[in-house]
Amino acid sequence: GSIAAPEGNRYDTIDIQTLYNGRAWRNLYHRIRGDQFLFSSGFMPGSVVINDKEFNNLQVRYDIYNDELLTITDRGIIIQLNKEMIDFFSMEYNNKVFHFKNIDADSLSSLSGYVNVLYDGNTPLYVKYKKEILLLAVENKYDLFNQINKIYLQKDGKLIQINTKKEFLGILKDQKQQVHNFIKTNNIRISKKNPESFK
């Protein structure tokens, strides 16, 4: 059957086919403790840019175990969107909007798929959110999803993964002292658990 547009949007049939070009989603991990999603297993307000066209007022959630974006149609069908067609997406969580960019596997060797763009200036800063499954991590009975944040700084065309404050300052050679003073003055605790701290 045909799929109606998300509430409050006027898209024609071709737009809708473009947006919902994906496949029906099934949860394969219901026996694992925790979930495979970023922030929450619920759907959040978001938007998606497909081939330069923006689709707003969507409900989305981001599966960071498989690096796939899901949306729900007004008929309650959950669709895994076609990643190859998506340029950008954003989602809102706790009154904050997070912006993601789809990076091609070949353009930046060590990073591909959806990355959260923390800073998009001369030295872009990205976070790659991932989840892994820890086997029998709960009471030796249940597997558990565990989140890992990887932070990357793009400098002089190269992408460098940074794990600690020391590594971060090391990359910034020329502005090292300035940044160090800024961190101290503003009492910032730099931690991978809170990627925003690098920003």
Image (cartoon, grey):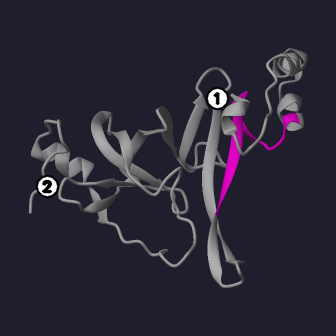
- Above or below, comparing residue 105 to residue 76 in the picture: above
Query: Which of 97/13 is in front?
Result: 97
| 55 and 103: which is toward the camera | 55
Looking at the rendered structure, the kind of residue marked 1 is: Pro
On the picture, is 24 further left or further right than 7? right
Q: Which residues are magenta?
A: 146-165
Residue 67 among magenta residues: no
Per the image, label 1 sits on a secondary structure element best described as: loop
Instruction: Give SS at disc 2.
Output: loop
Which residue is drawn at the image coordinates 50% and 36% (left, top)? 98
When the figure is inspected, residue 142 is found, relative to residue 18, above or below; the finding is below
Q: Position of residue 109 (x, y in %)?
A: 66, 48
Residue 51 position by quadrant: top left
Instruction: Classify 186 as above or below 41.
Output: above
Residue 116 visible from this viewpoint: yes
Within the image, what quadrant is residue 52 found in?
A: top left
Give the residue displayed 36% in from the left and 71% down from the top: 26
Q: Quadrant of the N terminus?
A: bottom left
Q: Identify the residue at horizontal 80%, vertical 33% (top origin).
A: 189
* Mark earlier in primary sequence (2, 1): 2
Residue at x-position 63% and y-position 42%: 127
Q: Which residue is mark 2?
A: 3
User: Circle 1 sits on which residue?
Assistant: 124
What x and y, as percent, mark residue 41?
A: 46, 58
Left or right position of 56 against 10: right
Quadrant location of the C terminus in the rendered image: top right
Q: In 3D space, how far apart are the residues under numbered discs 2 and 1 (Cα atoms)? A: 38 Å
Q: Amino acid at mark 2?
A: Ile
Residue 107 drawn above or below residue 169? below
Relative side of 33 to 74, left or right: right
Is the stretch drawn in magenta largely helix, strand or loop? strand
